[in-house]
Amino acid sequence: MTEQSAADLVTQIQQQINRLCFLFFNDVGSLQRDAPPSSVRGEPTKGTSNYDVDKTTAEMADQLAASVPPLLGLIERLPDVEQNEEEAKKELAALQQQADALDEELRVALQGAEAQLQDAQRVFGLLVQEVLDGRAREDGGGEPPPKHDDG
């Protein structure tokens, strides 16, 4: 099984679980809203209702039960895990070491890039100063503008 299809399978399982939860909580909410009052200690209840609790709960139970087999079918299609906990921990430790090494490599590369940027900015400043000095000499031999020192 490819990674993509395994990911799709997990997404389908999540969708089925969401559907099961939706049905369950909607059914419980409907029962709470529509069912007639019921006695807790045998006291008489007030009010009557034409709501058939037994029929409605049976229909809701059938609907919930019908949504379980597709979920179980998807779960059965999941690939078997071929690692025990110790092997998984070793693999995670190796991956963490790789991540740490890459992090260090990127940190060094970033420092080098920042140094190159500072050098480029310094050279750019010198070039700009040279151009300004040249323009000042062309415009009448006056004094060049003050030197700009970034370093």
Image (cartoon, grey):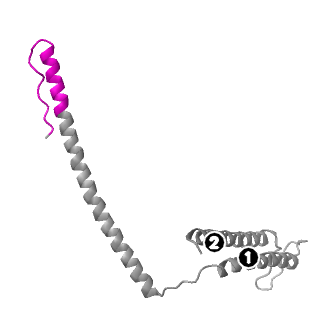
> Foreground: 45 or 101?
101
x then y, percent, for residue 93: 37, 78
Is 107 above or below relative to 116?
below
The numbered mark at residue 113 is: none
Left or right side of 14 for 114:
left
Q: Mark 1 Cα within 10 Å, few/some/many (few <14, many 20+)? A: few
Residue 72 lies, with reference to residue 104, above or below; the image says below
Residue 9 x/y as whole percent:
63, 72
Point out the stretch of residues depicted in magenta: 126-150
Residue appearing at x 28%, y 64% in the figure:
104
N-terminal of the pair, mark 1 or mark 2, is 2
Quarter where residue 55 is shown = bottom right
Quarter containing the C terminus: top left
Give the position of the N terminus as an image quadrant: bottom right
Q: Is 44 situated above or below 23?
A: below
Secondary structure of residue under mark 1: helix
Categorize mark 2 by other alpha carbons within 10 Å: few (<14), some (14-19), many (20+). some
Asked whether residue 148 is drawn in magenta, I would say: yes
Q: Looking at the image, which residue is at 58% across and 68% down?
A: 4
**Residue at which label 2 appears:** 9
Secondary structure type for disc 2: helix
Q: Quadrant of residue 100?
A: bottom left
Q: Position of residue 29 (x, y in %)?
A: 74, 69
| 127 on left or right of 89 | left
Which residue lies under the disc numbered 1?
70
Q: Quadrant of residue 61?
A: bottom right
**Residue type at tag 2:** Leu
Does residue 86 show up magenta in the picture? no
| Mark whose residue sits in front, 1 or 2 | 2
Q: Residue 17 in the image: state x and y as whole percent.
A: 67, 73
